[in-house]
Amino acid sequence: AVGTAVLPRRDSLLLEAGFLAVLVAPLRLLRGGSAAWRPHDGVTFWLVRWLLFRLMFASGVVKLTSRCPTWWGLTALTYHYETQCIPTPGAWFAHQLPVWFQKFSVVATYIIEIAVPVLFFAPMRRLRLFAFYCQVLLQLLIILTGNYNFFNALTIVLASSLLDEEHVGRWLGRTRRRHSSAWPPSLRSLLSALLELSAYGLLLYGSIRCFSLEINWEKRLLDSKVAFTYHEFTTWLRTVTLPLVGLGFLSLSWEILVAMYRCACVRGCFWKLWAALQWAVFATATLGMFAVSLVPFTYVDYESNGKLWPGIHQMFNAVERFQVVNSYGLFRRMTGVGGRPEVVLEGSYDRQSWTEIEFMYKPGNVSRAPPVVIPHQPRLDWQMWFAALGPHTSSPWFTSFVHRLLQGQRDVIRLVQVDESLYPFNTRPPLFIRARLYKYWFTGSAEGSPGPAQWWRRQHVQEFFPPVSLGDPALESLLSQHGLKDKPLLSRPADAVLPWLLRSLRQLSRPCSGPVLLWSLYLVAATAYVLRALRRRPRGGSPPARHKGPRRGEPADRGGSEKNGQVRRKEEERGEGRARGGTDGHSDGRARGGTDGHSDGPRGSKKKK
């Protein structure tokens, strides 16, 4: 009943990240090898970092290349919170913040999305960690103020490519003791600290210079404005696009060389050849993915896109239909500047008295608080937001949606309300349906009204869809025009297993809403993971002896058993000596309780060793 014509950016990101997960996942063709790490893992994992860079950099750049006056005037967030697809209750509170803070938030967004992503490829880990926490902070703030399904959580997962084992170990309580730093510091550490301070200073200076940041002490606020022109920005973008491609290539080349060195350090001729073969395959695949991704990445500057090698364009054209690489650019233009457009459906039995049809998630009733639905993706409510941006003829699916509601199809009604008792026409479908266009605004913190507290205020604008009924010539004409007339269903065997299984799953999950169902699945998965971790913990007894495991890339069971056997034999020999009360004075002294045994014991054991 409801479809989409264009694949949204969030779905494109999910497709590309899913494809990269195939390359990042460990290859376990031979059981003898280590399942936790491969020498080439750093190469394939670099693609995740490159995807994060393309996503964030393009999202920041398109806000300025679109020439949207709200982004250039730094006032976009004064409209964003109330005009986004499905706001949260936090969006209402963020909308009440002062204008100067909203403008500063736009400046911070530019810095995090355009300047900070360059640090993804910094050689100093602390710069990469700084970039990681900047990205996570931005995504968490978006989660608090907007329902963008899995998108922000997926972006945080991509940002984990900036972390290393040492930093993650601190989160898990597996910190390693570091030796105290020597004084004076080495030349390398001194240069590293100077470069880090230079990077932070450059970010601060560039932010102040580009956005004229200045504290107004009289009004006690922070003034900001864009201090460059559109021509200056496009010139800068044209200058840095290809150098950024070169920076990415240098970073990838370094990862490939490091992986090659690790392959050379693997012990054993067979395992070294096996590691080298995997390195060659995955390095080639990574280079191919990097080359293909350059075409959508350089869409931000078409002059740079035209300078790419023609072979790269041919490679991209060959895989474009699979959408394994995509172009990104979120919130290019700010919609709803004059008020949030919203379509309100109404049904009637007599065409005189009309009853509004309330949706589960999108704004309707002005007294209902905005919902929290992440990570669920309510497709119908999202499409209703897009439909309100233009006439109903630009959204052909809307005509079919009205037609299904007039027919009273239960599957379509459950898209509107999972609890059918909340649907006003659950006993009998309406005879007439119409749609009206409203403008919605958040109420102010100082506004008050008798009765329940109102989150929204609205104003009727015009008719969106005329009143229609089943068999109405206008409705039939629109259905025929868009090719949406009822078609006979495909006949399937009555004993087909897959349709029966899908129907059973839908029947079981029907009473649950999307967010409840998804969070239940997440909790089940998390519980299974915790139980699995607890089962692996040793039950009682002394903890296992700590010993160094095999090196990275070395088979876990090769050479380890012989070495461990020698250690165990030495421990058994020492234990037998203690039981016999040997002549080294160590055990005798302990039996007598004298001081001589305590002082001679260690010396005797050293002589024995």
Image (cartoon, rainbow, N blue to C red):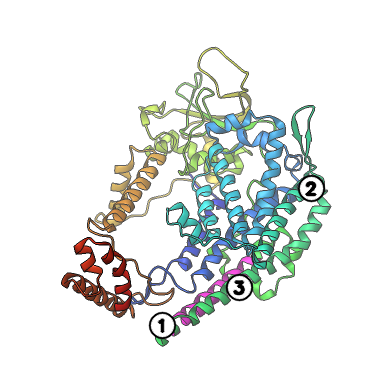
Query: Mark 2 sits on what residue?
Result: 210
Q: Residues within 10 Å of mark 1 (few under 14, many from 20)?
A: some
Q: Residue at x 52, y 56 (%)?
A: 160
Compared across the picture, whether 244 is left or right of 262 comes to: right
Q: Residue at x 65, y 63 (%)?
A: 184
Instruction: Find numbered disc 2 in the image and state the secondary structure of the residue it sits on.
Output: helix
Separation (CA) of disc 3 from disc 2:
33 Å
Front residue (pair 403, 241): 241
Q: Residue at x 26, y 66 (%)?
A: 597
**Residue range (magenta):** 273-294
* Residue at the top extreme, as displayed: 450
Q: If you read the primary sequence from the N terminus, does the residue marked by circle 1 or circle 3 appear first?
A: 3
Instruction: Answer yes or no: is residue 465 visible.
Output: no
Pointer 1 with pointer 3, Cβ within 8 A = no
Query: Mark 3 sits on what residue?
Result: 254
Instruction: Find numbered disc 3 in the image and state the secondary structure of the residue it sits on.
Output: helix
Query: Mark 1 sits on what residue?
Result: 271
Q: If you read the primary sequence from the N terminus, does the residue marked by circle 3 or circle 2 appear first?
A: 2
